[in-house]
Amino acid sequence: MDPELPSQYQAERWYSAPNLWVKLRRTASVLGKKTVLTTLTLYHCLMDPDTPVWARGVIVGALGYLILPADLVPDLIPGAGYGDDWAALVGALGTVAAYVKDVHKVKAAAQTEKLLGRTGR
């Protein structure tokens, strides 16, 4: 936590790994396979010490937006609720793609299968 920043601007307020896992366990089947896979790929990239700080900031922003209950399009709207979350995740993935390693993708795929089952959605 950065003591120089007011609390509303600190990443820990919006993103935490435990909150991400709670969100994924609750909503994985609604989010769908592509969104869960993208989320977990970003998560593993975030956890990699080789990922630059600026890229981690981009990832934390996207994952935080997914977790945030109040966003641009409310998540409860059927068919559209997670569209803005998907856009944030894809935008972040495109921005940090140079730092996404095969191992991040493999770990994400394995965890996606665990969350959604082998068939996915």
Image (spheres, grey):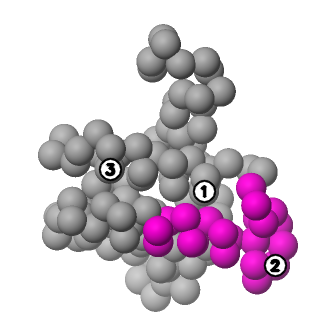
Residue 70 lies left or right of residue 12; in this view the side is right
Q: Position of residue 77 (x, y in %)?
A: 84, 73
- Secondary structure of the residue carrying tag 3 is helix
From the image, tell me which residue sits under label 3. 55
From the image, tell me which residue sits under label 1. 66
- Secondary structure of the residue carrying tag 1 is helix
Q: Amino acid at mark 1?
A: Leu
Which residue is farthest top?
3
Which of the two marks, 2 or 3, is nearer to us in this view?
3
Marks 1/3: CA–CA distance? 17 Å
Residue 116 lies left or right of residue 23; in this view the side is left
Report the quarter where the N terminus lies.
Answer: top left
Mark closest to the chain's N terminus, 2 or 1: 1
Residue 92 lies left or right of residue 29; in this view the side is left
Report whether residue 73 is seen.
yes
Marks 2/1: CA–CA distance? 16 Å
Report the quarter where the C terminus lies.
Answer: bottom right
Q: Position of residue 4 (x, y in %)?
A: 49, 13
Q: Which residues are magenta?
A: 71-91
Q: Residues within 10 Å of mark 3 (few under 14, many from 20)?
A: some
- Write the residue at 51% across / 73% down: 35
- Secondary structure of the residue carrying tag 2 is loop
Marks 2/3: CA–CA distance? 31 Å
- Write the residue at 62% across / 65% down: 85
Q: Position of residue 101 (x, y in %)?
A: 18, 64
- Write the residue at 46% across / 88% down: 119
Residue 9 lies left or right of residue 70; in this view the side is left
- Write the residue at 31% across / 61% down: 96
Disc number for residue 3 = none
From the image, tell me which residue sits under label 2. 78
Q: Amino acid at mark 2?
A: Pro
Front one among 53 and 42? 53
